[in-house]
Image: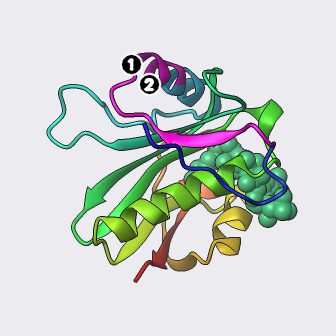
Amino acid sequence: MARLRRSLSSLPPRAHVEPVGADLVALAQAHALDVTVFPHQSLPPVLGGDAPPSVWVARAERDGPVIGFVATRANQSALEISGLAVEPLHRRAGLGRALVRAAVRAARKRGFSTVELHVSTGNTAALALYASERFRQAQRVEGFYSDERFPDDGDAWLMVRDVR
Ligand SMILES: CC(C)(COP(=O)(O)OP(=O)(O)OC[C@H]1O[C@@H](n2cnc3c(N)ncnc32)[C@H](O)[C@@H]1OP(=O)(O)O)[C@@H](O)C(=O)NCCC(=O)NCCS
């Protein structure tokens, strides 16, 4: 399987991001991370659904456990990032950025015109990451998240990045 490496010096030297493909163990690890990080399930069903998501996972080293993931699915002309998470102990090492870049590269390769996502208006870390990766705040969506644990009454930003 082709490995998508990132050359920025901030990424730990042996860390990498790769498409998860049919690796069910990696998918299970990504799901486990998903439920610990989010109050809702951000990873869409991978098996049995009509439009299974494309998922990339991050590892600190080859064959190590999954410490991050990004999940995407097609939404008309956009590739939507439906979930992105990095394990708390591995944050601020460039993995979130590497995962976003893997999704953007895939969108470009597959002919999508934009990459889009929703992010809580109170999610400072994710907002900073997306802004630094040239996503713009396209629309504020009131009450996007129904779970009471989200700030700002669940408001989210729809963020969009052109990839052409
Ligand atoms: C958002 C998240 C994926 C970022 O992952 P990460 O691996 O820590 O991100 P990176 O190390 O690649 O950071 C890239 C940039 O994002 C910004 N950033 C990341 N975390 C930040 C924080 N806590 N505060 C401010 N800026 C932050 C910075 O600009 C950073 O660049 P820098 O480290 O050179 O300053 C991670 O914090 C996470 O999993 N959060 C919980 C889940 C979540 O909110 N997902 C997004 C849902 S839309």
Q: Which residue is mark 2?
A: 27
Q: Which quarter of the rendered picture does the C terminus lie within?
A: bottom left
Depicted 95 relative to depicted 46: above or below: below
Q: Residue at 70% of width from left, 63% of height from top?
A: 129
What's the residue type where badge 1 is placed?
Answer: Leu
Q: x and y percent of residue 54 in the render?
A: 35, 44
Depicted 19 relative to depicted 60: above or below: below
Residue 17 magenta-highlighted: yes
Q: Which quarter of the rendered picture does the N terminus lie within?
A: top left
Secondary structure under tag 2 reads helix
How is colour applied across the structure in the image? rainbow
Can you see residue 151?
no
Q: Is residue 45 left or right of residue 50?
A: right
Q: x and y percent of residue 4 in the render?
A: 55, 49
Q: Which residue is mark 1?
A: 24
Depicted 162 relative to depicted 18: above or below: below
Q: Which residues are magenta?
A: 13-29
Depicted 152 relative to depicted 49: above or below: below
- Nearer the observer, 25 or 148: 25
Do callouts 1 and 2 mark residues in contact (Cβ within 8 Å)? yes
